[in-house]
Amino acid sequence: DGKRTVLVVVTGTQRRGAEVFGEKVAKSLGDRGWDVSIVALEQSATDVSIAAEPLVRRSEGISLRGLNPTVVRRLRSIVRTHSPSVVIAGGGATLKYTVPALVGTGTKLVYSSIGEPAYWARGRVSRTALRILLRRPDVVTAVSHATARQLTEVFGVPPDRIAVVHPGVPADLTNLEPPREHDETRVLFV
């Protein structure tokens, strides 16, 4: 139908890696004409936050541990309201909530694997659950080739469904003055 609507789902409202990346993706897609909404599964306990509407407020005392049906219902309601053509789920608990919320919708799903999935899913039950959840995304983005290898070798994601998307930095960040003859240029990356 030509509709270009995307829903970006992040874990919390705190300005952390996946949340900041989700915010940047939302802005970039918005600048390209997409109708974009960004939601967080939960409100973080900080005032330094991204512009995302939380599905769960701190005052409610609802936990994301396990699979909370209230959170799934709320996310499914947002999906029904916005009718996105694509959902982008980034980091943390987003996959386990997004997959059941999208059942029967036909909505495309992009999942961003932001770290070392084998580290976070160390137990047999966790690995099995993640392997099952990773069957649903149409595309899985990985922050590195090592992450992509883990997704394929440990979790069975077909390589043709994985795109390596290295985290970027603004180009002007590396516009350093060239060192003078006796000066040293030092760059620290933490």
Image (cartoon, rainbow, N blue to C red):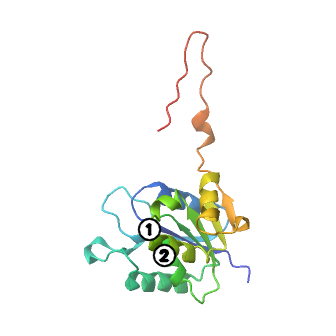
Q: Could one spot residue 144 in this view of the protein?
A: no
Q: Do tag 2 and tag 1 residues touch (Cβ < 8 Å)?
A: no
Q: Say which element carries label 2.
A: helix
Q: Residues within 10 Å of mark 1 (few under 14, many from 20)?
A: few
Left or right, 172 with respect to 69, comes to right
Q: Which residue sits at x=68%, y=60%?
A: 163
- Where in the figure is residue 92, as x and y percent of width and height? 46, 65
* Residue corresponding to mark 1: 123
Left or right, 46 with respect to 41, comes to left
Pair 2/1: label in front: 1
* Residue corresponding to mark 2: 96
Q: Residues within 10 Å of mark 2 (few under 14, many from 20)?
A: many
Specify the amino acid type for callout 2: Lys
- Where in the figure is residue 115, as x and y percent of width and height? 52, 56
In front here: 169 or 160?
160
Q: Is residue 51 above or below residue 76?
A: above
Q: Which residue sits at x=69%, y=69%?
A: 158
- Where in the figure is residue 55, as x and y percent of width and height? 40, 76
Q: Which residue sits at x=50%, y=63%?
A: 91
Q: Which residue sits at x=62%, y=76%?
A: 135
Specify the amino acid type for callout 1: Gly
